């Protein structure tokens, strides 16, 4: 009995240590001029990177590229079910994702990380990160081309400007990839190697930069954006430049805290409102979000 108790205590302590390690983080840093290091264990969403003289493994936030190792049977089964294809087909998608990532990382790139532990199996530490290549966010590129699925919402990056907004963007990209039947979504149509019709634009890269450095966004903020900044720094004060719930543009709604493109579309679709009090009826706006939003409307 005593031995069982000791074992239970050890398991509890180990679990606590695991949770603490997984959540422990440092301030966000931007690592420039990073170089890809080819390694057999790399895949589409996890790879070896040289930063200066140090080698580190980084794992992309929010996405999961299919595995290429048959030894990871249960995970391959899960991924195959997600894309609606067979396991052998899923492994082919994984190989395509790996080559796609290698191509994107062939030139120096930027890594943004707070060193949140991604719990890899290598002797090297592995950390979650956002990676920006010459064409923009690598996670977005993978999802846009049907080479990765949305995954890992629990590994939520903290201390950033509305990370939910990035998740919503990835959802839209995945939806488009499904419609265009590219990558994993087009395997049964012979479209594994077909790339998304809409290439990533400069505006996507700009948005990615603003996600990390909102204070370096457009030098002349709109009145509503200025109001958002004012209220964020001083919760007790109400914004001076209020907007009309029934006439506000999508850009104005999108600039509000906690809204994003998806919620903005829902607000517009639910118009007309008797008053801004009806925001509570919009799907996705709970009490906390409503309390943040209501002061911005007449």
Image (cartoon, helix red, strand yellow):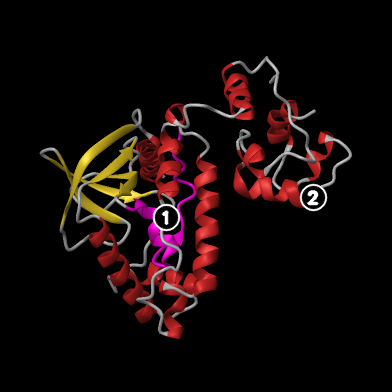
Mark 1–mark 2 Cα distance, whole angstroms, equals 29 Å
Left or right of residue 181, residue 296 in this image: right
User: Is residue 242 rendered to the left or right of residue 121?
Assistant: right
Asked whether residue 119 appears in the rendered view, the answer is no
Q: How many marks?
A: 2
> What residue would you read off at disc 2?
270
Where does residue 277 sit, x and y in percent of width and height? 83, 34
Using the image, tell me which numbered label, if any, was put on residue 20: none
* Label 1: element kind: helix
Residue at 77% from the left image edge and 40% from the top image edge: 247
Based on the displayed image, in which of its 4 quarters is residue 222 positioned? top right
Horizontal relation, residue 91 to residue 107: left or right? right
Q: Residue furthest front?
A: 220
Residue sitting nearer the eye, 244 or 29: 244
Which residue is denoted by mark 1 in the rendering? Answer: 140
Residue 260 belongs to the span the image colors magenta: no
The answer to whether residue 234 is visible is yes
Q: Which residue range is magenta in the image?
A: 135-158
Indicate whether 94 appears above or below 59: below
Q: Could you tell me which quadrant the C terminus lies in?
A: top right
Q: Earlier in the sequence, mark 1 or mark 2?
A: 1
Q: Return the residue nearer the eye: 60 or 31.
A: 31
In the picture provided, is 129 more to the left or to the right than 185?
left
Taking the spot 32% from the left edge, 69% from the top edge, the residue there is 94
Residue 37 in percent (x, y) is at: 15, 53
Quarter of the N terminus within the rendering: top left
């Amino acid at each position: 009995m005593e031995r069982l108790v000791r074992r239970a205590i050890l398991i509890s302590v180990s679990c606590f240590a695991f949770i603490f390690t997984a959540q422990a983080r440092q301030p966000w840093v931007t690592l420039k001029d990073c170089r890809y290091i080819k390694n057999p264990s790399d895949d589409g969403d996890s790879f070896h990177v040289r930063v200066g003289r140090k080698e580190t493994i980084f794992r992309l936030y929010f996405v999961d590229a299919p595995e290429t190792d048959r030894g990871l049977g249960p995970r391959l089964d899960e991924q195959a079910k997600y894309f609606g294809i067979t396991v052998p087909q899923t492994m082919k998608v994984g190989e395509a994702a790996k080559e796609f990532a290698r191509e994107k990382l062939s030139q120096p790139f930027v890594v943004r990380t707070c060193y949140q532990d991604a719990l890899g199996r290598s002797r090297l530490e592995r950390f979650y990160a956002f990676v920006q290549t010459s064409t923009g966010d690598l996670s977005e590129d993978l999802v846009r081309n049907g080479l990765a699925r949305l995954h890992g919402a629990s590994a939520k990056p903290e201390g950033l400007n509305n990370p939910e907004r990035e998740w919503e963007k990835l959802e839209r990209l995945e939806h488009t990839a499904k419609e265009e039947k590219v990558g994993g979504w087009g395997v049964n149509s012979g479209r594994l190697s077909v790339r998304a019709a809409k290439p990533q634009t400069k505006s996507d890269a700009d948005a990615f930069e603003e996600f990390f450095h909102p204070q370096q966004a457009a030098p002349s903020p709109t009145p509503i954006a200025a109001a958002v900044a004012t209220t964020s720094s001083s919760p007790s004060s109400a914004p001076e430049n209020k907007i009309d719930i029934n006439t506000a543009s999508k850009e104005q709604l999108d600039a509000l805290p906690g809204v994003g493109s998806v919620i903005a579309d829902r607000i517009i679709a639910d118009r007309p409102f008797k008053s801004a009090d009806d925001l509570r009826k919009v799907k996705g706006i709970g009490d906390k979000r409503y309390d943040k939003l209501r002061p911005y409307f007449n």
